[in-house]
Amino acid sequence: MEQTKETSLPRKPIFAKKRASKFARKQAWTGFAYAAPALLLLLVFRFWPMAFGAWISLWKWGFVPDKFIGFGNFAKIFEEGLLYKDALLGWQFGPIANSLMVTVYYAIGTIPISIFLSFLLAYFLFQKIKGKGILRTVFFIPYITSQVAAGLVFKWIFHTNVGVANAALKSVGLQPQDWLSDPDPLFVHVAAAFGGTWPSSIPTALAGPSYALIVIMLFTIWSSIGFNIVIFLAGMGSVSPELYEAARIDGAGTARIMRHVTWPLLSPMVFLLSIISVIGSFESFNAFYIISGGEGGPLGTTMSLPLYIFRTFYVYGQVGYASAISMFLFAIILLLTWVQYKYGEKRVHYLR
Amino acid sequence: MNAERFNFSQLSSRFLWGIVTVIVLLLAALVLFPFLWMLLTSFKTADEINLMPPDFFPHAWMVKNYAEAWMKPESTFARYFWNTIVVAGLGTALQLIICVPIAYAISHFAFKGRGVIFMLVVATMMIPYDITLVPNFVTLRHIPFAGGNDWAGAGGKGFYDSYMGILLPYLADAFSIFLLRQAFLSVPKDYWEASQVDGMSSFRYLYSVLIPLSASSLVTAGLLGFIGKWNAVSWPLIITSTEAIRPLQVGLLYFVSENGSRYHELMAAATFTVLPIVLLYFAAQRWFHSGIAASGIKG
């Protein structure tokens, strides 16, 4: 009697379930306890700043809160920061539009070159060659080097009077340049080289990067290829060698294999790197700060938006306005990341 | 005919490969040049650095440039070095102590909201650095009971101008957490189940099984954290005002605003700032590259 009852009622599963739920509760609490410290720090120093920054941006706020002005700071961005009307000159680019152009030139001048160059180098370093460990280290060292120290070295190399770059130019019979203090943008120089002038009706902010900005771009490419190479090498390691063999047997040469096998298979890395790099470009501060001596000069041609925010906050003490501009910058970064996801993801080949 | 053409293409591809090798070596030389020039300049005299065209090698190796650069800033580089060692060393240790458990939690424990927590961690990678500067500055000034503050966080200067202020906002690092999670997930699940059956405590499993098995990822996370903290400049500059607690990179900025022509001393200072990190990288390189590969970065 007892026996049949025992078998007809599934007691064991119930017992197991009860135990499991008690066990699971303990597990849940332990897991949560392990996660808590980091979670707390992330909430306080990453997520709270988003909310708090949005709140500050609604205030006229020096080093202490002054008064609530609603969207006043944002209105200021659009009225003075982007475009403003000068009594004599008509519509002019404001400092924020100028900084945006600086950042756009910088992104265009660094990201494609850096990614493509590191792809080629990684492809080379992936082959069986002697000394590839040393070469990999050589390309990686700039990435771990302090940007302050390295930026100062670049400043020294491009020194107008006694820099080694100008010495090299002179030795091959070229004109030395005022690398870091010539405010004229690239296309003004190009126009002058062909005997023309840049039309005065177009703002010079649209005439390309200044030489100082080009030096900063060189610096960035120099310091970023090491990281990109590491990512590409990790990606190449996960592609199965049979694919290359199959392509070889089908008669594809190195160039075609790179173009039609390696590049598409590494497109997830290219996608990842381009998203990281675009965000990085719009947040880049160190190189600009060091090479321009913190002033964004000559004539604001190296005033990246983060540097402008830093100066608004740190030099001019306009905390509210600085917060509003960083919200504006965040909106731009989100938009760009979203656009890349929307149009980039389709071109990515996942091999799964 | 066929064989001849094959031979020819092999020859040309050999030739092309040779050209590519030369280009790569040239690029490597170009990448190294700034370091070489930094070193060479650091040993020159004030007269030599003002030569145009410059001489490649110094005439006499001026080791005393290093001593002069060291003593130049008000609080000397000894102080800056000490501050950086404290901030980077303690910061990295704390960073691992904080990031390892959360990585453990999201890789090994089933609980409600685990997915949400992982999403939150990953999402922090998207938050721009600049947006956090001002609010974190304000938050740190108003930490209750710190730096003379009362319970409401008013009255004192909080963690402003302190090591804690430099450290605290960057202890929980999303990339480290991600890296460690990947490493912990790659440890066979059987070990975890076996430890559960044996009634091993979760903490014991963490330090006696998981951590030893994920050593390369731990080294990678630690090294990246250390390098980042060693090289950080804008946050330490903002959150401090006393030279005596400022780190190395901020000390180096002393030379940025100075418009003099003492580039030989500057290059000496740059050299001793860069050298420890490069040496550290050489020492940890072996674990480092396998650690990055193990993170399974797949886009």
Image (cartoon, coloured by chain):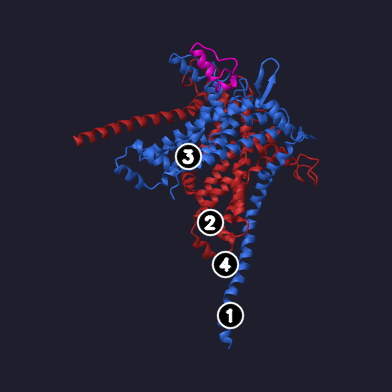
Q: Nearer the viewer, mark 1 or mark 4?
A: 1
Q: CA distance from mark 1 to mark 4?
A: 30 Å
Give the residue number, with chain letter if any, for mark 2: B210
What chain does badge 4 belong to? B
Q: Seen in the image, is A169 located left or right of residue A55?
A: left
| A188 relative position to B247: left or right | left
Q: Please report the bounds of the magenta region as a residue range.
A: A183-209
Q: Residues within 10 Å of mark 2 (few under 14, many from 20)?
A: many
Residue B121 highlighted magenta (yes or no): no
Residue receiving disc 1: A9
- Report if the CB atoms under discs 2 and 4 are less than 8 Å apart: no
Report the amino acid beneath label 1. Answer: Leu
Q: Quadrant of the N terminus of chain A?
A: bottom right
Q: Are marks 1 and 2 on the same chain?
A: no
Measure how far apart labels 2 and 3 are at the Cα level. Answer: 32 Å
Residue, disc 3: A270
Q: Position of residue B78 (x, y in %)?
A: 63, 34
Badge 4 crowding class, 10 Å Cα cut-off, few under 14, some 14 to 19, many 20 or more, is few
Tell me the residue at 45%/34% (across/down).
Answer: A116
Mark 2 and mark 3, same subunit?
no
Q: How many marks?
A: 4
Residue B4: image quadrant is: top left
* Chain letter for the part of the structure drawn in red: B
Q: Colour of chain A?
A: blue
Q: Is residue B158 above or below residue B111?
A: above
Q: Chain of mark 1?
A: A
Tell me, yes or no, whether dots 4 and 3 are on the same chain.
Answer: no
As for residue A205 lying within the magenta part, the answer is yes
* Secondary structure under the numbered disc 3 in the rendered image: helix
